[in-house]
């Protein structure tokens, strides 16, 4: 199965992995900022914005123009969305980019606020172009893409060719390997 938008996700994931040649993925470096992290955050969050619009359309919600609209549309239709998590091979700590989303309050995720500050006030907010925000935004993009594919295909699992499977941001629960005449695949549950 080929997934629209997935190739771009893989490019962004590889771009982030390339930075590990210069900045070690460790708790001590989560606040490290760079032009490359800024570029990854800007590209990733622009993609999140675009895919959220697609998710809203699939959910039949017409008024989806900003993160507030996305939050309302998605949590109304998918109340468990904010509990989605990911992991990395570099840390035991789960990544929960939408943890603070709720219908009761209008708080946007820190990584999204960082994106907007980088986009509009880079000269005073460059410190927000951090490794931590790059990781959180990439995890958020993967979660939004999985939600999009799940709704589009009306399925609770996604299957990727082995070479198209994510390498840095890993879905929870772990994927299941499938081997058949066409090759090796990894199946992930959308939970």
Image (cartoon, grey):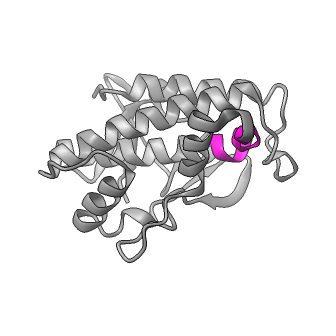
Chief secondary structure of the magenta portion = helix
Q: Is residue 97 left or right of residue 35?
A: left
Q: Is residue 56 above or below residue 2?
A: below
Find residue 8 and report its image quarter. top left
Question: Does residue 149 appear in this view?
Answer: no
The residue lying toward the viewer, choosing from 90 and 181, is: 90
Residue 29 percent location from the top left of the image: 84, 45
The residue lying toward the viewer, choosing from 135 and 2, is: 135
Question: Does residue 135 appear in this view?
Answer: yes
The residue lying toward the viewer, choosing from 81 and 158, is: 81
Residue 137 percent location from the top left of the image: 55, 44
Find residue 51 and report its image quarter. top left
Q: Residue at x 45, y 61 (%)?
A: 84
Residue 6 percent location from the top left of the image: 39, 28
Q: Residue at x 82, y 25 (%)?
A: 21
Q: Residue at x 72, y 33 (%)?
A: 123
Q: Is residue 82 above or below residue 137?
A: below
Name the quadrant of the C terminus. Answer: bottom left
Q: Residue at x 43, y 67 (%)?
A: 106
Callout count: 0
Residue 92 percent location from the top left of the image: 71, 59
- First to last magenta residue range: 125-134
Q: Is residue 189 left or right of residue 116?
A: left
Outermost residue, bottom side: 104
Q: Is residue 64 left or right of residue 41?
A: left
């Amino acid at each position: 199965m080929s997934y629209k938008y997935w190739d771009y996700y893989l490019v962004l994931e590889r771009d982030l992995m390339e930075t590990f040649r210069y900045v070690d993925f460790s708790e001590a470096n989560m606040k490290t900022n760079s032009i490359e992290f800024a570029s990854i955050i800007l590209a990733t969050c622009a993609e999140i914005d675009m895919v959220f619009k697609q998710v809203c359309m699939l959910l039949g919600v017409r008024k989806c123009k900003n993160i507030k609209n996305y939050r309302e549309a998605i949590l109304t239709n998918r109340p468990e969305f904010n509990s989605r998590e990911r992991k990395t091979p570099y840390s035991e700590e789960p990544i929960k980019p939408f943890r603070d989303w709720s219908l009761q309050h209008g708080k946007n995720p820190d990584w999204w606020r960082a994106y907007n500050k980088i986009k509009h006030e880079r000269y005073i907010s460059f410190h927000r172009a951090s490794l931590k925000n790059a990781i959180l935004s990439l995890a958020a993009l993967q979660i939004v893409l999985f939600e999009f594919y799940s709704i589009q295909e009306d399925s609770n699992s996604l299957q990727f060719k082995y070479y198209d499977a994510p390498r840095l941001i890993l879905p929870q629960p772990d994927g299941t390997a499938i081997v058949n005449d066409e090759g090796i695949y990894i199946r992930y549950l959308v939970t």
